[in-house]
Image (cartoon, rainbow, N blue to C red):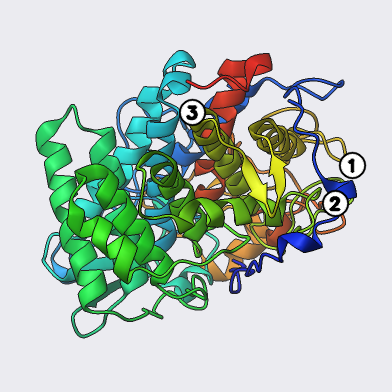
Amino acid sequence: MKHRSPRGMRVHAAAAALLLAALVLSGDVLPALGGGAPSFDYKDALTKSIMFLEAQRSGKLPPNNRIKWRGDSGLQDGELAHVDLTGGYYDAGDNVKYGLPLAFTVTTLAWTALAFTNELQAAGELDNVHAAVKWGTDFFLKAAAKKNHLWVQVGDPNADHQCWVRPENMKTPRTLYEINENTPGSEIAAETAAAMAAASMVFRNEKLYSRRLLNKAKLLFQFAKTHRGTYDGECPFYCSYSGYNDELLWAATWLFLATKRQVYADFISHEAISSSVAEFSWDLKFPGAQVLLAELNMTSGGGLQSFKAQADNFVCAVLPDTPFHQVFITPGGMIHLRDGANSQYVTGTAFLFVAYSDVLLRTNQVVMCGNQPVQPARLREFAKQQIDYLLGANPEGRSYVVGFGVNPPTQPHHRGASTPVLPLGYVVNCGMSFNDWFAPDRPNPNELTGAIMGGPDGSDHFTDKRSNSSCTEPCTYINSLSIGPLAALAIRGANLLATH
């Protein structure tokens, strides 16, 4: 089961006069690894976080597949419409390929590859991240082969959820879902455009491939903004509660960065809607776009002036030591917006805080919460705290990453990991599958290495039972957002404050 996010929290910045002097930060640099703060084997966590994404692959697996209990799956995807829709990723613990979270996973992976190139290269993981991006974009090129049309989902989720079977042996319907001029889906079209535009920058050394991605991104963005509408076909599993304005801004931002064309700058300046929010997730991309655009605010000398303030508002709403704090922090120090894949907000905030602190350091700027300055060092410190919480610095003293650290989870809510490897062609009795593989209170037979769990509840309590999907279901977009902060921690270490 999945638990999808409701509308993101809005941030309303109060007047500067209401700031309390006692809460003004000193501005001193806070050592990222000082004061007895815990430290972990971030390089190992980085490698394993990427491996989880490889465990989520659909299609014909490559010869260098590192997840030995995984095999080829979904090889007939698309046949119902006489198209090839093999490849892509299963989003979480089931066997459906959902377009919106899949595209967000790829966009954030591409951003990671761009923002943390040196760190990933030094850690020996840049090629693996590039491969993870390409596994998604190869699928998108097939899904977007026809103009003003996009295949957005493969698999009937209701039928899929009635059978606890690994993808290699699934016989559940591979129903196809699409958007077009008559059935628009601006969120999915724009998010896919963002993914392909960002990836076109990652693969600039592969000129033909990069050009293909960018051309498709342009067409998808045009489709998204010309035929506006929300696609509800992925409900109740991935409902777009926040609407499509954030995806349109997000896509236009990536297209502007990839092309530097004025048409996208004009859309951002004159047509796009932006809003300060306290959440960055598969459903709500405003803070991501604002962090990307904030650097242009500070270096272009004019235009786009609101985005730095909006990016600051996100920081001010999250940090517990500002007067504008809105996000709930558990007693143990973890961001908690809602049960069910809550770890995405933990890794998403850590990612944005590290990325934004790099921007601030490059431009010699600080975050302003009213008239209260917040130094980039504080963002790094908080990002590290959030990542460390998941790795083991939490009240339960345990890791929430499979195969990593102290007392890691053993029962991820995941069909492939919890089902033994079965012979090819083995016909699973769906009625018995839950009794055979879901219900037993025992560790999964296959280690889902690197999977970050949905995470503890608002009281820092975690139950390592696959039946508690709120705690134990992993998602691709939790891990995609963890890779950048882990790479920074792995390579910069005690010198986390250094830019690259």
Identified at 49% across, 16% down, the residue is: 123
Q: Residues within 10 Å of mark 3 (few under 14, many from 20)?
A: few
Question: Residue 245 appears in which quarter of the rendering?
Answer: bottom left
Of the residues tagged 1 and 3, which is closer to the observer? Answer: 3
User: Label 1 near label 2: C-beta < 8 Å?
Assistant: yes
- Counting the numbered discs, the total is 3
- The vertical placement of 123 against 354, above or below, is above
Q: Nearer the viewer, residue 217 or 446?
A: 217
Measuring from the top left, give residue 415's x and y in whole percent. Answer: 55, 54
Identified at 64% across, 57% down, the residue is: 341
Tag 2 secondary structure: loop
Side (left or right) of 474 relative to 339? left
Q: To which residue does mark 3 refer?
A: 362
Residue type, label 3:
Arg
Residue type, label 2:
Asp
The Cα atoms of the two marked residues, 1 and 3, are separated by 36 Å
Q: To which residue does mark 2 refer?
A: 460
- The vertical placement of 337 against 350, above or below, is below
Q: Residues within 10 Å of mark 1 (few under 14, many from 20)?
A: few
N-terminal of the two: label 3 or label 2?
A: 3
Of the residues tagged 3 and 2, which is closer to the observer? Answer: 3
Measuring from the top left, give residue 263's x and y in whole percent. Answer: 18, 59
User: Label 3 near label 1: C-beta < 8 Å?
Assistant: no
Q: Quadrant of the N terminus?
A: bottom right
N-terminal of the two: label 1 or label 3?
A: 3
Measuring from the top left, give residue 102's x and y in whole percent. Answer: 40, 55
Tag 1 secondary structure: loop
